Amino acid sequence: MPRRCSVCHKGVFGKTASVYIAWWPSENVRVCYLARICPNCASTVQDWLMLAAKQLKLLEVDERLSCPGCGEGLSDDGESTWLTVYLPKRDRIDAELYSCSKCADSIRVTGRDHGEKQPDRGGAEPLARAPAWDPWAALALDSA
C-alpha cells in the first residue's frame, strides 16, 4: 500500500520526506505537525530551507533582522518556526525560520492543513533505509 503525500494526496511508492513543522504560540505550549511530502511537492520544503539559509547569510553581514520571506524589518515581533526534515537516505536537517507573522503563517498552514498533529514528545525516530532508486537525489535540499 503506497504512502500518501500530505500535500498532493497522491500515493507514493518508496519513501516520502518527513517534515516536522513546530512553533510555540505561548510559553510551554508546543504545536507540531508532521507532513509527509513526495519528491514532486518537495520544492516547498526546499524553499523553506533556502529562506533559513538566506537569513543566516544576512545575519553575517547585518545585525538587523529582517524577514527572509518578505524582507520586512523585525524587532521583537518576529515569530520562530522550527523545521525538522528527514529526507530518505540523508541526515536530519534542522532549521529555524524567524519571520514576520504573515510569512510564519504561510509556512505553518502546510502543517495545519495537510499534516498530522503531533504530541509534544521531544523527538522522532529516524526513518528506515530508502529503496535503491532515490527520487530525492536530483533535489538540492540538503545544501541549505
Image (tube, rainbow, N blue to C red):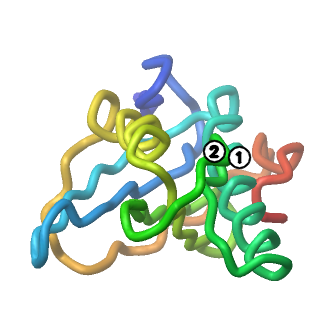
Up/down of 12 relative to 69, above or below? above
**Residue under the point 46% across and 73% down:** 126
Left or right of 125, for residue 45: right
Q: Is mark 1 on a helix, strand or loop?
A: helix
Camera-side residue of 84 and 18: 84
Neighbour tally class for label 1: few under 14, some 14-19, many 20 plus, Cα within 10 Å: some
Q: Is mark 2 on a helix, strand or loop?
A: loop
Left or right of 139, for residue 48: left
Up/down of 9 relative to 67, above or below? above
Q: Give the foreground label among 1 and 2.
A: 2
Residue type indicated by callout 2: Gly
- x, y percent for residue 41: 63, 29
Count of picture labels: 2
- x, y percent for residue 56: 73, 73
Up/down of 45 relative to 144, above or below? above
- x, y percent for residue 54: 77, 61
What is the number of the mark on residue 61?
none
**Residue under the point 10% across and 78% down:** 28
Neighbour tally class for label 2: few under 14, some 14-19, many 20 plus, Cα within 10 Å: many
Position of the C terminus by quadrant: bottom right
Mark pair 1, 2: CA separation: 13 Å
What is the number of the mark on residue 46?
1
Residue to which mark 2 is pinned: 69
Position of the N terminus by quadrant: top left
**Residue under the point 66% across and 62% down:** 52
Of mark 1 and mark 2, the one earlier in the sequence is: 1
Q: In which quarter of the image is residue 110?
A: top left
Residue type indicated by callout 1: Gln
Camera-side residue of 26 and 47: 26
Up/down of 103 relative to 68, above or below? above
Left or right of 121, for residue 84: right
**Residue under the point 37% across and 43% down:** 108
